Image (tube, coloured by chain):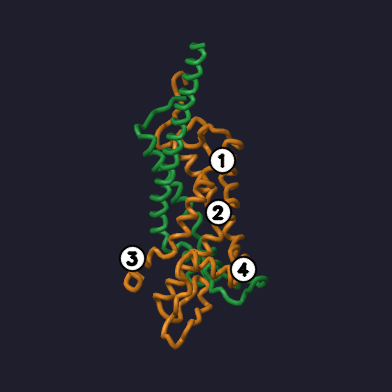
Chain colours: A orange, B green
Amino acid sequence: MARTEGVAGMYRGLGPPVCMMMVMNSMNFGAFYWARDRLAGPEPVGWGTEKGGIDWRVVAAATSVGPLCAMVSTPFELVKLQVQLDAANHSRGSGAVAGSAGKMKMKQNDPSAGGYRRKYSGSAHAARALMNTYGPRVFMLGHGVNTVRECVFNAVFFSTFEHVVHGFRYVHFHSRVGN
Amino acid sequence: MYRRDLGVSQAAATAIAGGVAGAAGWLANLPLDCVKSGVQGQCLGGGGWNGSVGKVGFVEAFREVMGRGGFGAFFAGATPSLVRSFIVSGSRFTAFTGAMGAFQALREQNTSLAELSRDTGANGE
């Protein structure tokens, strides 16, 4: 890709993830700490704290962020993947394989041109083209698996952070004096 | 119960913990991400406003990845993803806690100023 598309080609499809990250980070962190405060309170938990162990209320708060994130990330992820696959198919030439659904070979847009002709000029164009061709339902393609994915990711991501962040600063130990 | 400070700064601890959290999250996430990419990255065809746009569902995408190399195929290319997520998540948590700290300090400053001006006004009357 670097040879045929240049460095710019490697950044094709960057627009949607950057927009998505801005929206999702504010939503992720805001929703998680809101849920955490209500379920488990603001007290530190896990490694390096007096409590130690896993606080499942924090895990539940982290998991609850998943469905919210999936609502936003599914359309952006779809557009990103379609744009990146379009670029990859273009750089590979004709007969390129579409994603992991590789059994369905991409048909050449124009066989006489001797290669795959790119369908999308960018992310916004891809979103418009997908909307016009398939309707709004296309943006929810893979929403189920993406929701599960977001739940798993957020559960592990936020729970791990909350349970280890104090351990890198403090060590708690019991006094054996008088035993 | 005693607490001993390890001498690691708050920012460094946040960055390391954020990095570990990001890498752990992605490690758990990779199989599902693979399947999701299979579903969303399929060659779209047919469809229409009321038609079904996707031919490849969760099960087909899962089987497709399994057929490429078993369970290990779900973790193909894991190392760059994990390194990236360590860096990205570490910086993300550091930026978040830094920004929250700055906003908190600003709010406390504004509260102090408001109290000061109120006290000054009350004394002046």
Q: Which residue is mark 4?
A: A135
Q: Position of residue A152 (x, y in %)?
A: 55, 52
Mark positioned earlier in the residue sequence (2 or 1): 1
Q: Which residue is mark 2?
A: A150
Q: Which residue is mark 1?
A: A58
Q: Are marks 3 and 2 in contact (CB under 8 Å)?
A: no
Mark positioned earlier in the residue sequence (3 or 4): 3
Q: CA distance from mark 3 to mark 2?
A: 30 Å
Say what amino acid the circle numbered 4 marks: Gly
Q: Residue at x 52, y 37 (%)?
A: A53
Q: Position of residue B106 (x, y in %)?
A: 44, 31
Q: Position of residue A145 (x, y in %)?
A: 59, 60
Q: Which residue is mark 3?
A: A7
Q: CA distance from mark 3 to mark 4?
A: 33 Å
Element assignment for label 3:
helix
Q: Is B102 rendered above or below residue B64?
A: above
Q: Quadrant of the N terminus of chain A?
A: bottom left
